[in-house]
Image (cartoon, helix red, strand yellow):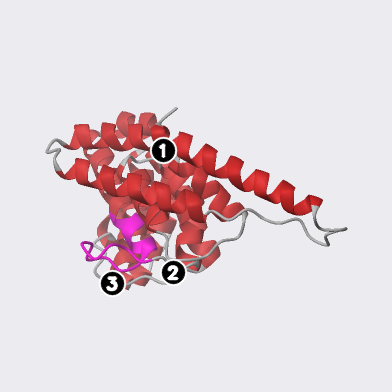
Amino acid sequence: MSLVRQQIAKARQTKSTAAQDKSKNTASPRHTEVPSTSNQYDLLKAALESDLGSLKQIAEVEKKHAYKATALEKNGYLNYLNIYRDEGHDHPNTILVWVFIWLVDLQRWSDAFEWLPLMVSQKQKLPTKFSTQDWPTFVIDQLYDAGNAQLEQGREAILHSGILSHFCTFISLFESHSWSVASVVGGKLYAMAGKLHAAVLNDGNALDCFVKAQQLNEGAGVKKIARDIASKRGIELDI
């Protein structure tokens, strides 16, 4: 067990003992006291700041990724965040922000998508070093790059990586929450999804995505491929 986890466990034990003592001196309490995450937050914030400092000393991207993956597990950041969410806390949370960024960096898309609605609803702020100012745009930019990397490797890479499934999941999330992003950003999301569908011969899905991309951004750059697919399928397309 890491030193941080030992400290957190000790803090929880102390709070549990205090709560038990309080219950002995209080007749028929109406509500059970809900433990706060303040102690864990302070301890883990210090650990996170140390991790961020260490990452600045690492040049290679692969080694940075390895460090982040190890730190997420070793320091129990996600365990803390589950408590933070389950107890209904809502405050500017540096741990939540950086863990989310790390999940995206590591392309742990399913985990990132799980936390994205909370990031948006709580209006957590991206660090000032990022030019992007909203979380859906941040994810779209990173997902686009990941999709493009697989697209360049071809059909087998797309199928093996599962990237298309992640695009479909994100688009469903994006549409169900009606998140607002710049038209160029929305256009690139659907354009890349369409290209990935087309590369694995999902022409119907590809065409739907290309039409949405063009509706969002006239300069999405997918008119020709959309018209080619429509012509092949005997569909008259007006874009």
Mark 3 nearby-residue class (10 Å; few <14, some 14–19, many ≥20): some
> In which image quadrant can residue 207 be found?
bottom left
Identity of the amino acid at label 1?
Answer: Val
Identity of the amino acid at label 2?
Answer: Lys
Report the number of numbered marks: 3
The reply to whether the magenta stretch includes residue 130 is yes
Viewer-closest of 126 and 142: 126
Residue marked by disc 1: 4
- Quarter of the figure that contains the C terminus: bottom left
Identity of the amino acid at label 3?
Answer: Glu
Give the image location of residue 226, x and y in percent.
33, 57
Q: Along the polypeptide, which appears first: circle 2 or circle 1? A: 1
Tell me whether circle 3 and circle 2 mark residues in contact (CB < 8 Å): no
Q: Residue at the location (47% across, 43% down)?
A: 78
Viewer-closest of 76 and 230: 76
Instruction: Label 2: state its secondary structure.
Output: loop
Instruction: Label 1: state its secondary structure.
Output: helix
Residue 183 visible in rendering: yes
Which residues, given as a range, are shown in magenta? Answer: 125-141
The answer for how far apart the CA atoms under marks 3 and 1 are is 51 Å
Give the image location of residue 156, x and y in percent.
32, 29
Give the image location of residue 166, x and y in percent.
43, 44
Q: Residue at the location (57% across, 49% down)?
A: 83
The reply to whether the magenta stretch includes residue 218 is no
Residue marked by disc 2: 123
Mark 1 nearby-residue class (10 Å; few <14, some 14–19, many ≥20): some
Q: Along the polypeptide, which appears first: circle 3 or circle 2? A: 2
Residue marked by disc 3: 218
Compared to 166, does 38 lie above or below? below
